[in-house]
Image (cartoon, helix red, strand yellow):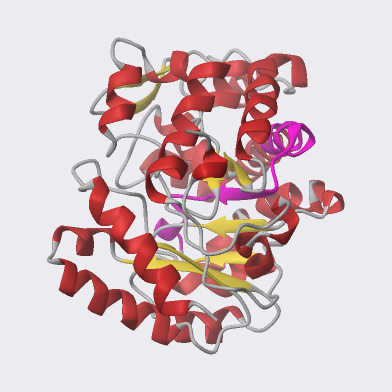
């Protein structure tokens, strides 16, 4: 079964005419479009089957495997967009950074960046470094047909957090110590990461991605003043670098309620909102001229179908006055989520919002 056979309220003739891209452009839509962060992956038994015995980074470098994994949730759930299956550290691995993704831990960097000399690890990214991405997106766009493909990358701050800490952190003490104590080195680090990130997004767009999302997963650890001074310039550089392609640019972070306006100012066309801030309040904070994405609490999916529908109506009601709304969770799909709950949620949003 190809992605084009997936159930859909209306089948557009091309990605440009899809409900997802129309919502991103704040145009009228036939129904509120739905996709889920981390929809391609760990909650699906078919994903676990094809990934069996294959490391995460290796799986990201196999075009046919990437294609299959990316298509799985489109087939199963009938979502309005696919998101390219990869990981935010893939471009770092591609330029030679010594890192690995350890199960149950996350990305671990062998030689953390702590000094100016350590910046030598970060050379420019070329399309040849990630030729498997170009190949996979070519395969995907042929299979997806009118269903849009979202490309993505990690934002400079989140990548810097991993590189400086050496792995996941809850406090970011080393990253913040550099940001506060050596602002010139910090700025140079983020600027270099902005160039790498922009290059990675350009590869995806030029290969056929219809939109891109910048994940600043850990930006919520920052005060607004620190974000504006020490992070926003690098994120803005990424968004500006891909502005000429004309594809929607989505910006998302967790715990970023106090940063929503700034994340929009960085250059986003769509601002992702986690579950902590109602969408009508998020719209007030972001200001006019941008669509919003979100924002059902992922844990709601463990409740009864009636409870899921009730909480979904709350999200949709809160989004009723928005210029543009893409329905999503407030963070990624949790590994133990029942896939059928996601399928029912897509159908419910489509039916409830049909115009």
In the rendered view, tell whether residue 276 sits above or below residue 51: below
**Residue that appears at 29% across and 10% down:** 53
Whether the magenta-drawn stretch holds residue 235 is answered as no
Q: Nearer the viewer, residue 188 or 199?
A: 199
Q: Is residue 300 left or right of residue 11?
A: left
**Residue that appears at 61% across and 39% down:** 144
Q: Quadrant of residue 312?
A: bottom left
Q: Nearer the viewer, residue 83 or 94?
A: 83
Residue found at the very far right of the displayed protein? 244
Q: Residue 141: where, in percent of width, then height?
A: 67, 35
In the rendered view, tell whether residue 127 sits above or below residue 276: above
Q: Is residue 101 left or right of residue 137?
A: left
Q: Residue 300: where, in percent of width, then height?
A: 21, 64
Whether the magenta-drawn stretch holds residue 201 is answered as yes
Q: Which residues are magenta?
A: 197-222
Q: Quadrant of the C terminus?
A: bottom right
**Residue that appears at 13% across and 64% down:** 303
Judge whether residue 308 can be spotted in this image.
yes
Q: Is residue 182 left or right of residue 45?
A: right
Q: Residue 67: where, in percent of width, then height?
A: 53, 26
Residue found at the very far left of the displayed protein? 304
Q: Is residue 52 left or right of residue 354?
A: left
Q: Residue 309: where, in percent of width, then height?
A: 25, 74
Q: Nearer the viewer, residue 115 or 247?
A: 247
In the rendered view, tell whether residue 133 sits above or below residue 338: above
Judge whether residue 113 can be spotted in this image.
no
């Amino acid at each position: 079964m190809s992605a084009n056979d997936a159930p859909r309220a209306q089948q557009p003739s091309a990605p440009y005419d899809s409900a997802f891209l129309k919502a991103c452009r704040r145009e009228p839509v036939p129904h509120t479009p739905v996709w889920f962060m981390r929809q391609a992956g760990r909650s699906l038994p078919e994903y676990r089957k094809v990934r069996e015995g294959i490391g995460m980074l290796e799986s990201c470098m196999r075009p046919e495997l990437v294609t299959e994994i990316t298509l799985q949730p489109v087939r199963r759930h009938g979502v309005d967009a696919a998101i390219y299956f990869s990981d935010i550290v893939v471009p770092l691995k591609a330029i030679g950074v010594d890192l690995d993704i350890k199960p149950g831990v996350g990305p671990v960097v062998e030689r953390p960046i702590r000094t100016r000399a350590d910046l030598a690890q970060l050379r420019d990214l070329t399309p040849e470094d990630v030729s498997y991405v170009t190949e996979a997106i070519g395969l995907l766009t042929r299979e997806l047909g009118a269903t849009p493909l979202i490309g993505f990358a990690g934002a400079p701050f989140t990548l810097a957090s991993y590189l400086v800490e050496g792995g996941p952190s809850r406090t970011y003490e080393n990253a913040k110590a550099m940001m506060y104590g050596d602002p010139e080195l910090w700025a140079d680090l983020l600027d270099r990461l902005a160039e790498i990130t922009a290059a990675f997004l350009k590869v995806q767009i030029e290969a056929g991605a219809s939109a891109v999302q910048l994940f600043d997963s850990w930006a919520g650890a920052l005060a607004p003043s620190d974000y504006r001074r020490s992070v926003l310039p690098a994120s803005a550089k990424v968004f500006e670098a891909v502005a000429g392609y004309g594809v929607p640019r989505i910006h998302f972070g967790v715990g970023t309620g106090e940063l929503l306006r700034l994340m929009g100012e960085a250059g986003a066309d769509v601002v992702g909102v986690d579950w902590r801030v109602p969408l009508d309040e998020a719209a007030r904070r972001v200001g006019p001229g941008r669509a919003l994405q979100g924002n059902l609490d992922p844990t709601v999916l463990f409740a009864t179908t009636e409870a899921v529908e009730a909480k979904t109506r709350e999200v949709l009601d809160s989004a009723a006055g928005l210029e543009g709304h893409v329905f999503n969770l407030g963070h990624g799909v949790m590994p133990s989520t029942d896939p059928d709950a996601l399928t029912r949620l897509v159908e419910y949003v489509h039916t409830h919002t049909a115009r």
